[in-house]
Image: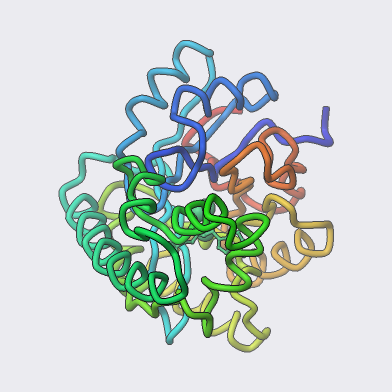
């Protein structure tokens, strides 16, 4: 029992770049033993109400969440907001502005990817997004369908990473602004997948100082796909910066098995859980 967490506070639905709709996501989570689930789509809360309704049917707790795209010192960083009020006007305006930036970026990406031979890039990416928030993942899926690579990971490596032909540098809202919106919405701001940014120790300490100064109160200590050494390192940062710990798979797609639901290890002892005082578990 103690080896797998019943909590997962970082997941995506089709409202952003997940492949399941909210009801399918909640059903899969429940079937795989998740009792407390946060839906944290990129820059939108559009599917939170549907997820909450499905969670009531399955008898699990749904934590309203969002994963916000931010910029800090030239890095793109993701901040997860948990326990947010999706109706908060300040949060809604901020997220709507980011979706505007994403729309403009998608048009620029489409022009660049047309040059490498992708047919109807904007149309196919929009079709992949199906009315949801357009992301690089949607372009990657469109490119897999047109045989530009074997899978989404190969497309990112060849086309969508910094320095590659389809990459468009985007200035997202400042880290501090995103943390402010989450706090305005009554939520807790959590630094997502802290080792995905490949920061040195010195930069990680600078980032966490800035994050705490802005009002951030949590860090993902247990992440999908991360091994024991990542947990140990994140635990060290959590303690050093007095941050609460979160656990989140970053689930998008059952085919990406390393971030599947229901396989996270529990939060280590000695770290304050980010859900403390918010939900009884
Ligand atoms: P965006 O926010 O539009 O820049 O897209 C970022 C999303 O792309 C992330 O949330 C991941 O879901 C996905 N992603 C980023 N890097 C990779 C990668 N190397 N392989 C597969 N998916 C990736
Ligand atoms: Mn994603
Ligand atoms: Mn992320
Ligand atoms: Mn994510």
Q: Is residue 85 above or below residue 215?
A: above
Tell me where residue 65 sits by quadrant: top left
Residue 84 vs 47, above or below: the answer is: below
| Circle count | 0
Colour scheme in use: rainbow
Q: Front-most of 131 and 181?
A: 131
Which residue extends farthest top? 57
Locate residue 272 relative to residue 164 in the image: left or right.
Answer: right
Where residue 32 appears, as percent x and y from the top left, is 69, 24
Q: Nearer the viewer, residue 23 or 221?
A: 23
In the image, 17 versus 112, the foreground residue is 112
Percent across and percent down for residue 48 are 36, 33
Residues 84 and 125: in front is: 125
Q: Horizontally, is 9 left or right of 100 in the view?
A: right
Residue at position x 40%, y 52% in the image: 42
**Residue 122, image quadrant:** bottom left
6 left or right, relative to 67: right
Vertical comparison of 164 with 183: above or below = below
Q: Position of residue 213 (x, y in %)?
A: 41, 75
For the C terminus, the quadrant is top right
Residue that appears at 32% across and 73% down: 111
Q: Position of residue 207 (x, y in %)?
A: 51, 79
Residue 46, image quadrant: top left
**In which quadrant is the N terminus drawn?**
top right
As drawn, is 222 to the left or to the right of 137? right
- Give me the residue at 53% from left, 55% from top: 146
């Amino acid at each position: 029992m103690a080896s797998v967490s019943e909590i997962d506070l970082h997941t995506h639905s089709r409202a952003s770049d997940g492949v399941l709709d909210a009801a399918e996501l909640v059903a899969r989570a429940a079937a795989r033993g998740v009792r407390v689930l946060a839906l944290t789509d990129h820059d939108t809360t559009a599917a939170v109400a549907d997820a909450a309704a499905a969670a009531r049917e399955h008898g699990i707790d749904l934590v309203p969440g969002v994963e916000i795209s931010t910029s800090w010192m030239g890095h793109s960083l993701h901040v997860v907001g948990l326990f947010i009020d999706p109706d908060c006007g300040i949060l809604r305006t901020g997220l709507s502005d980011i979706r505007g930036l994403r729309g403009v970026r998608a048009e620029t990406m489409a022009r660049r990817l047309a040059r490498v031979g992708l047919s109807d890039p904007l149309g196919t990416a929009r079709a992949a997004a199906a009315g949801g928030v357009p992301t690089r993942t949607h372009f990657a899926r469109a490119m897999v369908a047109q045989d530009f690579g074997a899978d989404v990971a190969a497309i990112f490596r060849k086309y969508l990473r910094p320095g590659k032909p389809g990459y468009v540098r985007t200035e997202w809202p400042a880290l501090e602004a995103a943390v402010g919106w989450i706090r305005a919405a009554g939520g807790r701001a959590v630094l997502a997948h802290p080792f995905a940014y490949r920061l040195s120790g010195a930069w990680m300490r600078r980032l966490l100082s800035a994050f705490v100064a802005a009002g951030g109160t949590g860090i993902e200590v247990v992440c999908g796909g991360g091994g024991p050494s990542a947990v140990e390192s994140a635990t060290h940062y959590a303690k050093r910066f007095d941050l609460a710990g979160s656990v989140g798979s970053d689930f998008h797609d059952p085919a990406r098995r390393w971030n599947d639901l229901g396989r996270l290890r529990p939060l280590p002892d000695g770290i304050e859980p980010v859900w403390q005082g918010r939900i009884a578990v």
